Image (cartoon, rainbow, N blue to C red):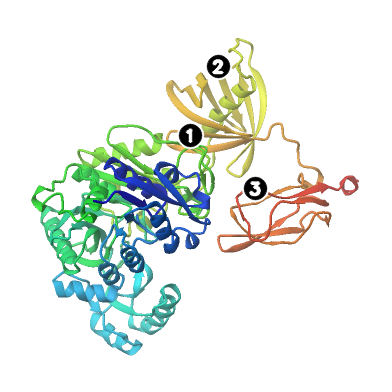
Amino acid sequence: MLKKLLIANRGEIAVRVIRTAKALGYRTVAVYSEADANAMHTELADEAVCIGPAQVAASYLNADAILDAARKTGADCIHPGYGFLSENAGFSNACKAAGIVFVGPPASAIELMGSKRRSKIAMQKAGVPVVPGYEGDNAGDDELIAAAADIGYPLMIKASAGGGGRGMRLVHQESELADNIKRARSESKQAFGDDELILEKAVIEPRHIEIQVFADRHGNAVYLGERDCSVQRRHQKVVEEAPSPFVTPELRAAMGDAAVTAALACNYEGAGTVEFLVDKDRNFYFLEMNTRLQVEHPVTELITGQDLVAWQLSVAEGLPLPLAQNDIELNGHAIEVRLYAEDPANGFTPQTGPLHVFQPAEGEGLRYDTGVRSGDEVTPHYDPMLAKVIAWGENRDEARRRLIRALEDTTIFGLTTNRYFLSRIIADSTFGAGEATTAFLQQSFSADPSLQPAKTQIRQLALAACVLAHGTSGQEAWSNAPATHTPMKLETGGETVELLVQSNGQNLSARLGHEHYELTIASIQNGLLCVVDKGIRQRCHYHRDGDSLHLQAFGKSWSVTDLTHQPAAGANGEGNGRIPASMDGAIIDVLVEPGQTVRQGETLVILEAMKMEHPVKADCDGVVAQVLTRKGDQVRRNQLLVEVTIDEASESENKK
Ligand code: MV4
């Protein structure tokens, strides 16, 4: 009997695994990096062991430290989650050698599926359909070129050790072949330390449909339906659903049988996912098998009513599968989206910083898998996924409606997220018709407004003004006094606006140039503003953070900073000498030291962000009072880096 599970992961998946393990009576052990000392997964487990510094190579990928933690706590089994060490055959073996059960398949299956070339050969031999191509052993460039002539164009060059689109090239004609083979080899060598390549005929505008399989030690294997993960962006899944709107019962049975054949052919054990490409004529081809529990497993759980982590633990104990194929029923429809701290209107730049408020909207058929809570910090060390938002419905449109509502009504303050992008996808008519292929986002969604920086509208500014005007009058009762005219200077979306606000505490009018907007305030308290807007009563959530005010209503989030009472910049546009980081990044050089005289515009430190160097410059003439950062530091946007004492002499000189 297994009694104590160590979870070799962090974030939402660690939390997810701990939840089921606890429910089944297991003791749980979390491992955490120094950056995760107060993380949700660390706090939720019965015991927790620090396994190293924030960098993943030193902590969550540190197999020795994790095995030490297991020995120290007496854990008898390890769940690897996804990512990190989950598909590392060496780690699976090391667990075994230490007498600890690895909750996952045998190392031999992980190894086989880690090679595109060998797994394709094995699958073909077992009778699983694969994309026609070439998977010769030790193939040189000449052999690949000869094979390409037989395959025809367009074709794909894939790194045998690759996965998830890495090391993959599409070739349209023979004249481009040799050069692409050379590039693919060097890329693959660079990325995976292995330059073995295979060739495949390219499937045009395929759907990505994967089958959840489970196998036990007793020779049983079943499938639990499919998941459609066609909506992807740069090989990152964005939306996942079950069942697939494209899969017929016949196709499901055929793909399910093929996936079970794949699992049996490699002596599989535990949870696995067999990925297929499906073309427009519903031909399907084996792509790869993922030998772990996947991020998107909840949609399968919601339509089967099964707990896949419970299945994994049961299989790891050596028990037979809980259900036979005929007992597995699919019910309703589930859709999952990955809610990220990232800015879709800005190239999907990851966002880091404090998550002031995270309050998932409650409702029938909604599930949130998350590893963060209000007050947590999103750091640059790990994937900035905040939560998986999953909706179940009797049918696909019910699931879509519930998911859109969940995205719109979840309160998130502090970080820009992709939620508007996600809700626009779910509401999209092509997606709604079940017609999204892997080309969908690029082909029919790239002009979506959620991908463009949005100007803050007068209505949004008026809502902000309601909160700001209320704040200054404190808890005073509403008065019938005549309206006061208050100019407000607000910074929003990178621009400064001068708003003229007229308010008697109840009726508010905001004017910006020729535009104006009227609102009646019904109530403001505890972060909730109720207004009557053109006869419609509506809610707006808000959160104050110093001079910043964050707001959320009608599915959108925006922020304003009140500059009304801030001193104006000095002459010649010089600033106040407090120099912040312009974005999240790493300090790669510090060029000044305290006491040093600097001129306005002089570079003080160099910040590296998004693979580019950004000079951070003095905003005034003066003397460096403090340097608050060091070379090698990770810094966040707006973090104070250098303080310069303004040189009064030069200031008055400038004014002459
Ligand atoms: C392909 C393909 C077309 N033909 N292979 C991308 C990720 C990797 N797992 C396999 N990928 C593809 N392989 C052949 N022979 C098109 C893709 C592909 C893709 C696959 C699944 C989901 C999204 C995708 C986006 C672009 C290309």
Q: Which image quarter: residue 503? A: top right
Identify which residue is drawn at 35% across, 57% down.
Answer: 80
Residue 486: percent from left, percent from top: 67, 24
As drawn, the label of residue 552 is 1
In the image, 89 versus 3, the foreground residue is: 3
Please state which amino acid type lies under the numbered disc 3: Gln
Marked residue nearer the N-terminal end (3 or 2): 2
Q: Secondary structure at mark 1?
A: strand
- The residue that mark 2 highlights is 506
Marked residue nearer the N-terminal end (3 or 1): 1
What's the distance in space between the residues labelled 1 and 2, CA to CA?
A: 20 Å
Q: Are there few (<14), some (14-19), or many (20+) residues within 10 Å of tag 2? A: some
What's the distance in space between the residues labelled 3 and 2, CA to CA?
A: 38 Å
Residue 328: percent from left, percent from top: 13, 48
Please state which amino acid type lies under the numbered disc 1: Gln
Q: Which image quarter: residue 211? A: bottom left
Position of 576 compared to 139: left or right?
right
Identify which residue is drawn at 14% across, 65% down.
Answer: 261
Above or below 453: residue 471: above
Residue 284: percent from left, percent from top: 19, 64
What's the distance in space between the residues labelled 3 and 1, CA to CA?
A: 25 Å
Please state which of the two labelled residues, at mark 1 or mark 2, is closer to the viewer: 1
Please state which amino acid type lies under the numbered disc 2: Gln
Marked residue nearer the N-terminal end (1 or 2): 2
Please state which of the two labelled residues, at mark 3 or mark 1, is closer to the viewer: 3
